[in-house]
Image: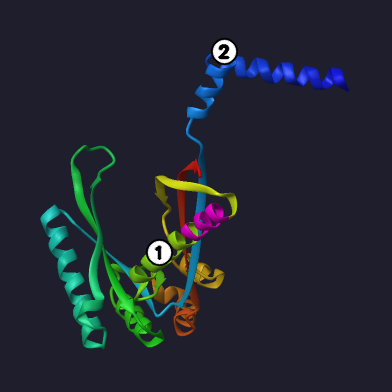
């Protein structure tokens, strides 16, 4: 056993010798050197807040194509305005309708480098508060062959404030740990660095499934089960969990 332990010690010593610079000097000099190396501790803090989802953001993709780029753009703008007007007429507030992603691409012939047409994809983002409003959006999609359902995201209307509150709570948790360590270990901790993690938003599994299963449906009418599935989720909003994480590094100074 002694031989085995000695072998391990020699192996570790050899590894340290290869990876670290060689230290030379008297014992007192080495003691002074080691004492001058900053001693640090890393403390993490986390917090979570649960709130019921109170709205859903439905994405409608509007795709138009024409021989010229200008005509494709004009057709897309006209259709988007038409859909927006229909939504407002049927009870969707104007402030809940907005433009989102935009893309354009030329379509080429098989044996030609010249574009034969241009396709424009644009997204309308509609915030709905209940199942009835979602059905209004679904009806608008079904009425236009160039419009399609492109997914839904569940939210809480106070999401921004909630994320800030969760982050503040995570900082408070880290500070409480720091104070506990100072009290119990008799050391003074001085702030060195701080890292803020992205606030994580977790949806219940059923909401994730609905948002995933029916995203990218080409025609919502041809997938009536998709309408019913999402509509049911909207009518039965569940809780969203917001999780915040922070990491704080302190330098240790003995009292």
Q: Position of residue 58 (x, y in %)?
A: 35, 72
Q: Position of residue 212 (x, y in %)?
A: 48, 65
Q: Image check: 145 left or right of 243?
A: left
Instruction: Please name whichever residue, 196 or 104, is drawn nearer the observer in this view of the structure.
Output: 196
Taking 164 as reference, is 223 above or below it? Answer: below
Q: Quadrant of the N terminus?
A: top right
Seen as rendered, the residue at the extreme right is 1
Instruction: Name the residue at 30% across, 74% down.
Output: 126
Element at badge 2?
A: loop
State which quadrant residue 84 falls in.
bottom left
Count of numbered tags: 2
State which quadrant residue 86 falls in.
bottom left
Instruction: Please tell me how crowded label 1 is: few (under 14), some (14-19), or many (20+) other residues with Cα within 10 Å.
Output: some
Taking 39 as reference, is 75 above or below it? Answer: below
- Magenta region's main secondary structure? helix
Q: CA distance from mark 1 to mark 2?
A: 49 Å
State which quadrant residue 184 falls in.
bottom right
Q: Which stretch is magenta? A: 175-183
Instruction: Please name whichever residue, 9 or 61, is drawn nearer the observer in this view of the structure.
Output: 9
Q: Is residue 151 visible?
A: no
Question: In this figure, which residue is indicated by the disc labeled 2?
Answer: 26
Instruction: Please name whichever residue, 56 or 223, is drawn nearer the observer in this view of the structure.
Output: 56
Instruction: Please name whichever residue, 242 or 182, is drawn nearer the observer in this view of the structure.
Output: 182
Element at badge 1?
A: helix
Check residue 181 for magenta coloring. yes
Instruction: Please tell me how crowded label 2 is: few (under 14), some (14-19), or many (20+) other residues with Cα within 10 Å.
Output: few
Q: Is residue 238 visible?
A: yes
Instruction: Name the residue at 50% across, 60% down.
Output: 176
Question: In this figure, which residue is indicated by the disc labeled 1?
Answer: 168
Q: Position of residue 62 (x, y in %)?
A: 26, 65
Taking 155 as reference, is 191 above or below it? Answer: above
């Amino acid at each position: 056993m002694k031989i085995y332990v000695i072998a391990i010690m020699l192996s570790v010593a050899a590894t340290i010798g290869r990876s670290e610079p060689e230290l030379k000097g008297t014992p007192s000099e080495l003691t002074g050197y080691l004492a001058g190396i900053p001693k640090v501790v890393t403390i993490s803090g986390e917090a979570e807040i649960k709130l019921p989802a109170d709205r859903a953001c439905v994405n409608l993709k509007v795709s138009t194509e024409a021989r010229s780029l200008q005509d494709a753009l004009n057709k897309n703008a006209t259709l988007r305005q038409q859909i927006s007007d229909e939504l407002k007429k049927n009870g969707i507030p104007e402030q809940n309708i907005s433009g989102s992603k935009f893309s354009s691409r030329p379509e080429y012939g098989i044996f030609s480098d010249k574009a034969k047409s241009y396709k424009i994809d644009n997204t309308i983002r509609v915030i709905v508060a209940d199942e009835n409003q979602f059905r209004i959006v679904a009806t608008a999609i079904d009425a236009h062959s160039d419009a399609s359902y492109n997914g839904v995201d569940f939210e809480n209307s106070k999401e921004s404030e909630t994320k800030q509150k969760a982050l503040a709570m995570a900082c408070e948790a880290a500070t409480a740990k720091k104070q506990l360590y100072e009290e119990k270990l008799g050391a003074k901790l001085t702030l060195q660095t701080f890292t803020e993690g992205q606030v994580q938003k977790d949806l219940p599994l059923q909401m994730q499934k609905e948002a995933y299963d029916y995203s990218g449906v080409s025609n919502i009418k041809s997938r009536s089960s998709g309408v019913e599935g999402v509509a049911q989720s909207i009518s039965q909003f569940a809780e969203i969990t917001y999780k915040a994480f922070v990491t704080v590094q302190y330098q240790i100074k003995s009292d």
